Image (cartoon, grey):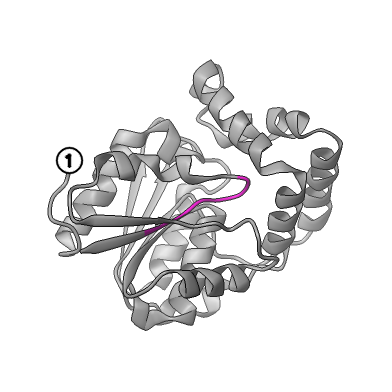
Amino acid sequence: MTTLLLIPGLVSDARVWKCLRDQATDGTTFHDADVTRDATIPAMAARLLHEVSGPFIAVGHSLGGRVAMEIAHQAPERVQALVLANTGHNARTPGEDAKRQAKIDLGHRDMQALAADWLPGMLDPARTGDIALVSDLTEMVLAAGADVHERQIRALLARPDAATYLPDITCPVLLLTGAQDLWSPVAQHQVIADLLPQSELRVIDNAGHFMPVERPDETAALVLDWLSRQGLATATPQEA
């Protein structure tokens, strides 16, 4: 039995990793992580380790990728593999506080305005006119609300510098990002890959930061094929 811990990112929910639920084979169980309640990334990781029993594969998107790395740092013996998508590893950068605070303030004034301001930059530019996609992601952001948005932003501002412990993560790691992801670009994932003892980096074209939602079939195929090659899944739904 393979257990996938599916960890969404900022103001996101289970729909981010729906592609894996839709395409995974029999013998796979899922746990949809809730990272809306805790004030720090280490606390998010600790809660999930308490909620999920036994060994598992942590699959994280964006903020969720940082939580997945922290889980592997806190309990390496529990983590069979990591899948890290559209994420980062660095500590807070100079000037970041003011930019993040502006987004917090906007969210408290008008979450609809925050979604309209934030989402276009998270997508492949060719998809910003996709009404169905943008509407679905907007609904997701609005469902999270301003308080969750602020709590998660403050957790990001206080994030650990994962570069200090990535070389100690010995499980296999798959890194994924979109070729059009300007927020978490390919070069950033290559830096993470270079710090890890055992990693593979794959890039999906025509995808931005919300790659698992923009390109669900391609994302699921790459993840499931990689898990199969690691001996952690029985088969893939299609060739990656």
Q: Nearer the viewer, residue 80 or 35?
A: 35
Q: Position of residue 48 (x, y in %)?
A: 50, 68
The kind of secondary structure element at disc 1 is loop
Q: Position of residue 225 (x, y in %)?
A: 19, 50
User: In x, y percent, where is residue 44?
Assistant: 58, 67
Q: Residue at x 33, y 78 (%)?
A: 170
Name the quadrant containing residue 142. Answer: top right
Give the labeled residue for mark 1. 237
**How many labels, in total?**
1
Q: Which residues are magenta?
A: 5-11
The reply to whether the magenta stretch includes residue 223 is no
Examine the image and state in which quarter residue 231 appears. Answer: bottom left
Let me know if residue 81 appears in the view. no
Quadrant assignment, res 3 = bottom left
**At 74% across and 34% down in the image, what residue appears?**
114
The correct choice, above or below, for 186 with respect to 162 in the image is above
Magenta highlight on residue 6: yes
Image spot of residue 206 (x, y percent) = 40, 30
Placement of 168 over or under 26, stated as above or below: below
* Image quarter (top left, top right, bottom left or bottom right) of the C terminus: top left
